[in-house]
Image (spheres, rainbow, N blue to C red):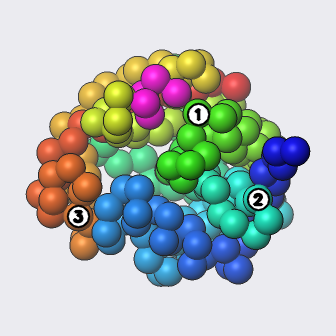
Amino acid sequence: MIKIPMIIPLATKHFDAVIALGNQVHGDGYLDEKSLAHIVNLGHKNGINSCFVAIDKQHLLGFRLCYAPGQWTVDKWCSPNRWGIEAERVGYFKCNTVAEEARGKGLGGRLLQASISALTQQGASAGVSHLWQQSPNNAAVKYFTKAGGKLIKEHPNRWSDTDEHPDYVCILCGSNCHCVACEMLLKF
């Protein structure tokens, strides 16, 4: 019998596993304890956590990190004039990561739905994300498009010019990442 992983709010007890999986999938320096704590803090609003993990028998299979509406900075990589919705009502889908052995089984979609539910309760009407165009077979953009996301703008070199991940080493490009971030909006 196949056990369906539980989707539960991310807590500090999950930090080590989330950091390890995030750095394994996205590259060294993608997450550390300080950056993850900051992200999770931005994901809390009105007593609601919009960050989730997928766990099977205490084994982390995936996670979704989000920022609550009104609690994140709209920066130069965002195009709010193209969103058609007030920025204060938009959450941010920071990261969706699924372990290789759990991919293709709908886990990313379940994590997304859990975050959409939480973001809605926090007052969001939409969520924006920057998706990794160079993901294997462009899976990130395909997945988000299938969920209803619309392409807003492509941002080359998004991850090479950021204070957010100063020690990031892309699994494709190395320390000078030239991957494209597809800014996408998903209305709920």
Quadrant assignment, res 161 = bottom left
Q: What residue is pinned by disc 2? A: 56
Measured as percent of width and height from the top left, residue 166 is found at 25, 71
Q: Nearer the viewer, residue 168 or 67?
A: 168
Q: What residue is pinned by disc 1? A: 104
Measured as percent of width and height from the top left, residue 154 is found at 27, 28
Query: Is 120 left, or right, of 84 in this rendering?
Result: right
Question: Could you say whether the residue bearing mark 3 is in a helix, strand or loop?
Answer: loop
Q: Which mark is residue 169?
A: 3
Q: What amino acid type is highlighted by mark number 2?
A: Asp
Give the residue at x 40% y 39%.
Answer: 130
For residue 141: magenta? yes
Q: Residue furthest front?
A: 1
Check contact, mark 2 vs mark 1: CB within 8 A. no
Question: Could you say whether the residue bearing mark 1 is in a helix, strand or loop?
Answer: loop
Q: Mostly what secondary structure, the magenta segment? A: helix
Query: Is 145 left, or right, of 141 in this rendering?
Result: right
The magenta span reads 139-143
Q: Mark 2 vs mark 1: which is more N-terminal?
A: 2
Query: Is 2 left, or right, of 148 in this rendering?
Result: right
In the rendered image, the quadrant that contains the C terminus is top right
Give the residue at x 51% y 36%.
Answer: 128
Is residue 49 shown to the viewer in this render? no
Q: What amino acid type is highlighted by mark number 3?
A: Val
Measured as percent of width and height from the top left, residue 6 is found at 81, 53
Is disc 3 surrounded by few (<14), some (14 to 19) or many (20+) residues within 10 Å? many
Q: Mark 1 vs mark 3: which is more N-terminal?
A: 1
In front: mark 1 or mark 3?
A: 1
Q: CA distance from mark 3 to mark 2?
A: 29 Å
